[in-house]
Every structure is written in structure tokens, then in C-alpha cells.
Image (cartoon, rainbow, N blue to C red):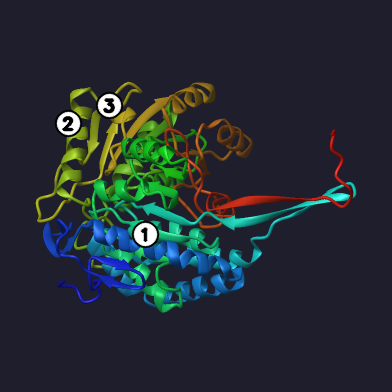
Amino acid sequence: MSYQSQPKASHFVNGAYLEDSAGAPIEVIYPATGKAIARLHAATPAVIEAALSAAETAQKQWAAMSGTERGRILRRAADIMRARNRELSQLETMDTGKPLQETLVADATSGADALEYFGGLAATLTGEHIPLGQDWAYTIREPLGVCVGIGAWNYPTQIACWKGAPALACGNAMIFKPSETTPLSALKVAEILVEAGLPAGLYNVVQGLGDVGAALVGDARVAKVSLTGSVPTGRKVYAAAAEGIRHVTMELGGKSPMVIFEDADIEDAVGGAILGNFYSSGQVCSNGTRVFVQRPILEKFLERLTARLASAVIGDPMDEATNFGPLVSQRQIEIVQGFIEKGKAEGARLVTGGKRIDREGYYLGPTVFADVTDDMTIAREEIFGPVLSVLTFDSEEEVLERANATPYGLAAGVFTRDLTRAHRVAAAFEAGTCYINTYNLAPVEMPFGGSKLSGVGRENSKAAIEHYSQLKSVYVAMGPVDAPF
């Protein structure tokens, strides 16, 4: 591998790097140049078996440790991640193409937050005492066992920690399969966890495509599957997990609405639209890609949005002045270009952007469509690229009906100075994560997840504990047994 901070092998199993060159090759492409920076190999059946076996063995001993001991290791790992933030951020930029300006504050730091938060929670995971007259009952919170995490390519470090931290805090083992597009960062997470004192076998990383994920999800030793990905992938993984009655968390895609009322602060609303459409070059699952603007401020909104987009610094992601980088792959840029052509063909007005930038790598300029109607493809399907669709509305009742007229329900946002209306609209949104006068913030303290086709379960916060543990109830009788015969 050519980059100094890159991992040493394709997989991390049982506390150490592991290579098996018999696996199908996986080329790692740096999106800023389109050139290969590493070559990994997909997990062979032998690698998958080694990971499952190591996880099953290590988990039982880990579960027997106190929550305080488990938490101490997770918090130590968080400290190491923060100390190496620049190195990890550079690797994340090589993996994803996201600007270093962004990865320095949003990726490894977010992963460290999760390790620290769940490390702090680990000692608090107790049951409860339930008085029942002279009898009583108590509950015990227990780990599930071996958990499988399947990651997406847009936030590889963050997702590896968002899934790993609560799983480990609850006493589980984790086998994590990153996206084959961004396979490097999770290996460093595994390496750091072991350095922090995590026993071997508790956090394993195996590479591969859908067949490797299917082999993990379908194994009888697996108790839980957590996926971040698209709805079509979610359907397959959910169905496979259901076959074995496994616990499941699904964080899937969306077509989220952002509603901007005429009394909103225009600069804040434009800032929210930029965060909700162009951060990470638009490759964020919760993006508010349907921007509903109340008619009286439409032109003012478009004018300020266009002006601010013109100041985007597009260039080398390793230059900290750059704030807009390439898309993740050739395939992804082709998908996004296809949506842009559909937008034009179906009558949307191209306000700015829409073209591939003439330089090496997968660069596409920030793109804004106006005069978008609810039935257009760009208003119905998830694009996962830097394409913002502006729709207009007149009344609150009308915009809520239209905002909710989607099979997805991941996120939603509202911009207004009327706080009564803000809370009323947030309550009416059919979405799992809602924002008032901001967008796309995801602190570890707050539950994150979707409704409808956007997923089941929640990541982050105390809510995640419910998805990585189970309750055992114990009834204690203090008197004689009264039987009918």
C-alpha cells in the first residue's frame, strides 16, 4: 500500500491483521484522481470462519467483565483516535475523497465521540427491581452475542464506531464489513481498539462485496445485524436476518424535505440547504434534498444560494482550503449525471451547476434545480450527490401534506422564526430525525434513525443500548406455590 498511514492487510481478525490473497481483488480508488491507492482482497470462507470463530469465543469472556472495565477500554480508544485525528482524517479523505477540512471535524472525531459516550454508559447498564406484593421480580440486561455491522461508503470511520461502540459497551462482539468502495478506515478503528486494550476477537473487520455480507448475516452464530445502506440492500439484508429471527437495525436512505417559511432567516436557511445538500458533495443519507420554499421569498432564496455556492472552493481534498470535493466513484458520478439529465428532460429549471468539472477525479459542480414538481424523478428518488431541488409552496397545511408524501422518512427540517409553528411542523413530519433552524447535525447524545422505508431501530444515544442488548426477567416467589391440583 502506498500511503503511510494505510492499514497493513485486508482484514483484521482475532486482534491482528490478516491477509488471504486467494480472495477476489478489491481496488481502492482515490476519488480525487481516479487512481488506485491500494489493493485489498475480499474475505475467503476461511477468513469469514476465522472472524466468526474468534468473535464467538471472545464475546463470552468480554460479557463476563464489568461494564466499568469495558467502558475504560472504549474511552481509551477514543483518546487514541483524537490524538491521531489528522492521520485518520487523511486516510478518510483518501478513502472517500471528502475534503480534509471536513474529515478533520466530522469523521474520526465523531467516531471518538461514540466510543467515549458508550464507554461512559457501559457501567450504567443495569436492570430494575419490580415489587409484586410480597413477591418481586428483577431484570438483567444481557448482551446479544455476535453482532454484524455492514457499513456504507460515505462515513466509513464514523459508521464503524457508531455500530461498534454500543455493541462492545453492551458486552457483544462485532464483525464489521465496510463498503468495498471505502475499505481502509475501519481497519484503523480495529487496530486502535486493540491498542486500547480490547481483547482479541471482539472487533473484527472483513472486506468484501454482497456475498461476504450474506455469508455473515446468514450464519447461525450471529445474533444481530446492523446495516447502513440503501433501501434495496436493506430489503435483502432484512429478509436474510429474518430467516434466522435475528435482531436488526436498518439505517437506510431518504428523500427528506426541508421546509423554509417566508419569515425564516434567509442566510440560516441557505446555510441549512447547503449543509443538507452539498456537505460531503451531497453524499449523506439524511440530506434534505427536497427544499420547499414559500413563494414570496423564492427568488431571494435562489439568489443567495447561487451566490454562496459560487464561493465554494473546489479542488484538492488534501488542501485544507478546499471545502467541496469529488464524488466517491465513477459509478456514483454517472448515477448523479443521469438524474441531472432526467431533471432537465422533465422540465426542471437548472439554476446552477449540472456539469462534470474538467479535471481528473470524480468532480461534479454543486447543482440546483428550481421549478421542480412533486412528480419529477429528482423529487422522488434518492440521488446521493450534490443536487438540490427547489419546490415552492403557499400554506403550511399544503407543504406538510407534500413533504410527507414519500415512502421515506429519515429526516426533515423546518426554518422559521415562529417557534410555535416550528414545533407544530416538526411534530407533523413523518420522519425519525427532525431539525428546527439547522440541518444534518448528528450528535452521539441524540437518537438517529428513520421511519417508513428509511429504516428500523435507532443509532446513538441511550436508545442504541436497547438494540444491542436484551432483557432477562426473573420472578422471585417469597411464599408457597399455589397450584390447582
Query: Measuring 58% from the left and 37% from the top, which residue is drawn there?
Result: 422
Instruction: State the residue at coordinates (54%, 63%).
Output: 169
Could one spot residue 322 in this view of the protein?
no
The number of numbered badges drawn on the structure is: 3
Q: Amino acid at mark 3?
A: Thr
User: In whole angstroms, how far apart are the C-alphas of marks 3 and 2?
Assistant: 10 Å
Q: Which mark is residue 52?
A: 1
Q: Is residue 251 positioned above or below 79 on the image?
A: above
Q: Is 1 drawn above or below residue 333 in the view shown?
A: below
Q: Residues within 10 Å of mark 2 (few under 14, many from 20)?
A: few
The disc labelled 2 sits on which kind of residue?
Glu
Which residue does the numbered mark 2 point to in the structure image?
Answer: 341
Horizontally, residue 16 falls left or right of residue 165, namely left
Which of the image's four quarters has the N terminus? bottom left
Callout 1, which amino acid? Leu
Q: From the image, tell me which residue sits under label 3.
A: 377
Q: Residues within 10 Å of mark 1 (few under 14, many from 20)?
A: many
Q: Nearer the viewer, residue 18 or 385?
A: 18
Q: Which quarter of the image is occupied by the C terminus?
A: top right
